[in-house]
Amino acid sequence: MATQPQLIDDEFEPRGEGSLDARNRLPLTKVVEALRVQFGDLSDLRFVIHQNKAGQVLLSPATSVPLHEAWLLKNPTALASVRRGLEQAAAGELVDRGSFAQYAADDLDE
């Protein structure tokens, strides 16, 4: 995790001030509330933490991608295909292939 942070927007808004508690924790309640308004569900919220030589800290909200799904992000051809399919579906460009229920009990190892 030694990557440089990507500063997407340099217009920061004050969200309050906080002090460390006895266990060196800093409350981020107001920040998390603002993130919830902006992004909705935060059940998988994590922060990527960067610090510069001046001691300033940048917290970038992030989510983890399950390993079994990460291959898609590493495969530009497959990702482009998925995005194209989503765009086609959003535009109503669908083809009804009927039900696949007859194959539900098939053994996948065949």
Image (cartoon, rainbow, N blue to C red):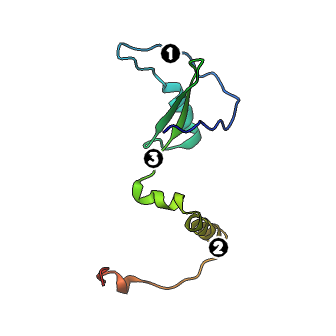
Q: Are marks 1 and 3 in contact (CB under 8 Å)?
A: no
Give residue 94's quadrant in the image: bottom right
Horizontal and vertical percent for residue 7?
A: 65, 35
Residue that badge 3 annotates: 64
Please determine whether, in this image, residue 67 is positioned above or below residue 25.
Answer: below
Note whether 38 is above or below 79 in the view shown.
above
Mark 2 vs 3: CB contact within 8 A: no
Question: In the rendered view, would you say 108 is above or below 59?
Answer: below
Give the residue at x 59% y 67%.
77
CA gap between label 2 and label 3 equals: 31 Å
Give me the residue at 63% from left, 69% from top.
Answer: 84
Q: Tell me how far mark 1 sits from mark 3, CA to CA.
A: 27 Å
Which residue lies under the disc numbered 2?
Answer: 92
Q: Who is closer to the viewer here, 11 or 5?
A: 5
Give the foreground label among 1 and 3.
3
Q: Residues within 10 Å of mark 2 (few under 14, many from 20)?
A: few
Determine which residue is flagged by label 1: 18
CB under 8 Å between callouts 1 and 2?
A: no
Q: Residue at x 48, y 39 (%)?
A: 1
| Mark 2 residue type | Gly
Q: Position of residue 95 (x, y in %)?
A: 58, 82
Q: Secondary structure at mark 2?
A: loop
Quadrant of the snapshot with the C terminus: bottom left
Residue drawn at the location 53% of the way across and 58% of the way down: 73
Looking at the picture, how far across and down is residue 59, in whole percent? 54, 30
Give the residue type at disc 3. Answer: Ser
